[in-house]
Amino acid sequence: MFSMISIASVVMAIAMIVMILASLLSKKALTDREKCSPFECGFDPMNSSRLPFSIRFFLIAIIFLIFDVEIALILPMIMIIKFSNLFMWTMTSLIFILILLIGLYHEWNQGALNWSS
């Protein structure tokens, strides 16, 4: 029991020493290059966060998130092909991909994918 406590305290001491050394050795500049440049979405990080932003950027980000989640739903379908009925698996996959394609066509038709308009 004593050896477990001593080993744990030595490990904690080494971890604390490493964290203290890392914080002392890492010099942080007052004017960081990343903080002075705008983000990818066009926000200026030093201004107020209540400024209006581009709705087009918001729509593109939402479309990306939707298709990202759908890819996460499609990938497990490959793994379950061995354990399921082939006809039902094919029909489910085709219906799911058809819904995705109809949604993509609708977004394209509505002009949500046109960045410069």
Image: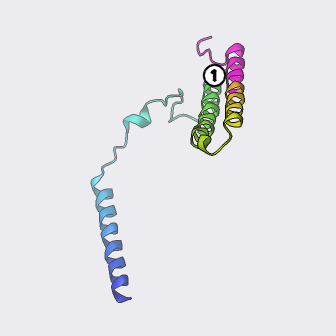
| Amino acid residing under circle 1 | Arg
Rendered image quadrant of residue 106: top right
Rendered image quadrant of residue 15: bottom left
Locate residue 102 relative to residue 4 in the image: left or right.
Answer: right
Residue 111 sits inside the magenta stretch: yes
**Residue 25 at what x, y percent from top left?**
27, 54
Mark 1: give few (<14), some (14-19) or many (20+) Cα within 10 Å.
Answer: some
Foreground residue among 45 and 69:
69
Q: Residue at x 67, y 32 (%)?
A: 90
Q: Is label 1 in a helix, a strand or a loop? A: helix
Residue furthest top as drawn: 117
Foreground residue among 71 and 109:
71
Query: 56 above or below 45?
Result: above
**Residue 20 at what x, y percent from top left?**
32, 63
Quadrant where the N terminus sits is: bottom left
Q: Residue at x 37, y 35 (%)?
A: 33
Locate residue 79 relative to residue 95 in the image: left or right.
Answer: left
| Region rendered in magenta | 100-117
Q: Residue at x 50, y 36 (%)?
A: 46
Q: Residue at x 62, y 24 (%)?
A: 54
**Residue 86 at what x, y percent from top left?**
66, 36
Rendered image quadrant of residue 6: bottom left
Q: How many marks?
A: 1
Identify residue for label 1: 56
Foreground residue among 58 and 34:
58
